[in-house]
Amino acid sequence: MEIHRYEKLWFGLSLLLIVGFIGTITYGAVGAGVQMVSDDGGTVEPSFSTINENEKFAQQEDNQAVHVEGNEYEVAVIAQRFSFQPGTGSPIQVPEDSRVTFYVTSPDVIHGFSVVGTNANTMVIPGQIAEITVEFDELDSDEPKEYGVVCHEFCGAGHEEMAGQIQVVPEDQWEGDA
Ligand SMILES: [Cu+2]
């Protein structure tokens, strides 16, 4: 059987396209630090009255990152309709040059936790504690630096107003434990 050479060419190009598509899907799934939402942070009964029984949430008394060791800190955030606690109203405070693990959960519906302008972004599912670690560099001035936090999962009538802030504080102005 003879195959016309244009047909062969077309055949080859189509195969190449398919390989290319599989490549982009694979990169999207495993490259660029992309991960599925996990429950690595554990699970919690999704209700306002029981979240604080979880040790991560019980230790989060105010809006300051809790020191773990070295330059490692953690912050437990409740994403709820339509705010982040802490984060909305007064910013979450973290020291510069730190590695901060955020534990985020929701007592009501699915929310998102996205740090604007960075690739830190996770879905927040009721009952699961999303865990995401963010590195904050040393500041290049002695002014605090602010990042916005937004919810990127439509969660109801006030969704577009669901926002918070993270404030990276210079070391000499850091008032939390270190
Ligand atoms: Cu929301």
Image (cartoon, helix red, strand yellow):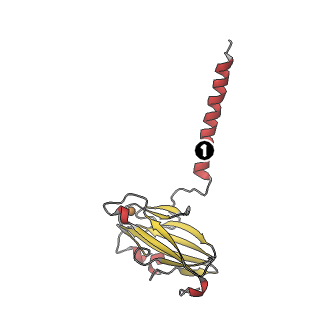
Q: Residues within 10 Å of mark 1 (few under 14, many from 20)?
A: few
Residue 58: x percent and y percent? 44, 80
**How many numbered badges does the structure rendering display?**
1
- What residue does disc 1 label? 24
Residue 133: x percent and y percent? 57, 68
Residue lying at the far left of the rendered structure: 157
- What residue is at 32 percent from the left and 60 percent from the top? 156
Split into 4 quadrants, where in the image is the N terminus? top right
Residue 6: x percent and y percent? 66, 20
Q: Would residue 55 be seen by someone viewing this image from the given angle?
A: yes
Q: Could you say which quadrant of the image residue 5 lies in?
A: top right
Split into 4 quadrants, where in the image is the C terminus? bottom right
- What residue is at 52 percent from the left and 67 percent from the top? 131
Is residue 86 placed above or below 131 in the rendered structure? below
- What residue is at 57 percent from the left and 73 percent from the top? 100
Q: Could you say which quadrant of the image residue 163 lies in?
A: bottom left
